[in-house]
Image (tube, helix red, strand yellow):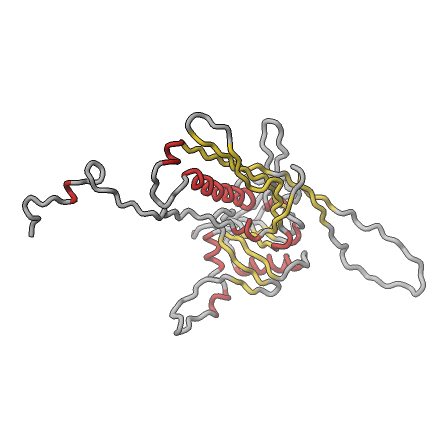
Amino acid sequence: MSMSVGAHSSYDEPIATGGNREDLSDVLFDVSPTETPFITLAKKGKSTGTNHEWLIDELEEPDENAHVEGDDAAPEDAAPRDRLGNYTQIFKKHAVVTGTQEKVLKGGGIKSEMAYQVARRMKAMKRDAESAMVGTVNGAKVPGNKSTARKMGNFQSYLTGTSFQGGEGFVAPTGNGANTGTAGTERPLTEDLLKAGLAQLWTQSGGNENVNAIVGAYNRGIISNFTAASTRYVTTDDKKLVASIDVYDGDFHTVTVTPDRFSDPASLFLVDRDYVSIADLRPANTKDLAVLGDSTRKEIVWETTLEVCNPQAHLMIAALTTADA
């Protein structure tokens, strides 16, 4: 059947050139990932200078301790405490919106273009910080000068030979933020490797039994194939197959496994959340910049640093393969 002769249709009033209005949803769809697991689990602290420092201590190894009744005191000079430090890093984003764009009617439910742009840049800046702390960027700390930006040392750079497990030929960081070491030859993540890491963590640290594993997508899937997954089954009520491990119950620790899109995909970080902190010198804030022409300008600034309260509370399994052979 054809259209009636002389009928005025929607084809006669196209949206671009005719009289019909566009049908634009007031919902804006953005699937960009914004989760930052490492920043979320860390404690929130405060810095009062650009070189944020903290102290760590360690008990001496157990020794034979037997004394004659009534003997004199024999004072022992304990080992000195160690001081660690990290530099604050300035994260910045800018938003510039013309006067016209701020006033025109916008789709996607956006009322203020500037408010929208500031919000999205805040999220982007948090992703930058996550990557700076556990990502693949060169993570050694940099003191900075008048022409060089300060940089915080990343999580890896504060680990040592006992808290950094790499492949063959690895060189551990010195543990003071000055370098990130060398991961060594890649090898696959196995359950035995994870168990050995957890045993090492228990040996060196009296921290929490509950720790977090921060890991990339590929090795998150590998963990789901560990032995613990074989004991799972589907209830007839749920009619749902659970094929992943969210919590790994080991001999020494209960591990909450969290995938992180912005962490080093070749590394697994075992993190005791009580011993890692994000220390803000200037919490994330927005300020107006001088008007230049017919536009509004804002700057978003966050000056913060990473405090690895005691490196022995954590462990990193590095040099992991990130794809099937």
* Direction top: furthest residue: 293
* Direction bottom: furthest residue: 236
* Direction front: furthest residue: 103
Please give the count of numbered marks on the rendered protein.
0
Rendered image quadrant of residue 86: top right
Rendered image quadrant of residue 110: top left
Of 89 and 138, which appears nearest the observer? 89
User: Residue 231, percent across and down?
Assistant: 48, 70
Q: From the viewer's perspective, is residue 163 above or below residue 101? A: below
* Residue located 71% across and 49% down the image: 56
Of 295 and 69, which appears nearest the observer? 295
Q: From the viewer's perspective, is residue 121 above or below residue 64? A: above
User: Residue 255, percent across and down?
Assistant: 56, 60
User: Residue 109, percent across and down?
Assistant: 37, 46
Q: In this view of the protein, can residue 140 be seen by the observer?
A: no
Q: From the viewer's perspective, is residue 267 above or below residue 105? A: below
* Residue located 64% across and 45% down the image: 46
* Residue located 43% across and 30% down the image: 295
Q: Is residue 299 left or right of residue 100?
A: right
Of 47 and 114, which appears nearest the observer? 114
Q: In this view of the protein, can residue 24 be seen by the observer?
A: yes
User: Residue 262, percent across and down?
Assistant: 49, 46
Of 17 and 315, which appears nearest the observer? 17
Q: Is residue 88 left or right of residue 2?
A: right
Q: Is residue 146 left or right of residue 291?
A: right
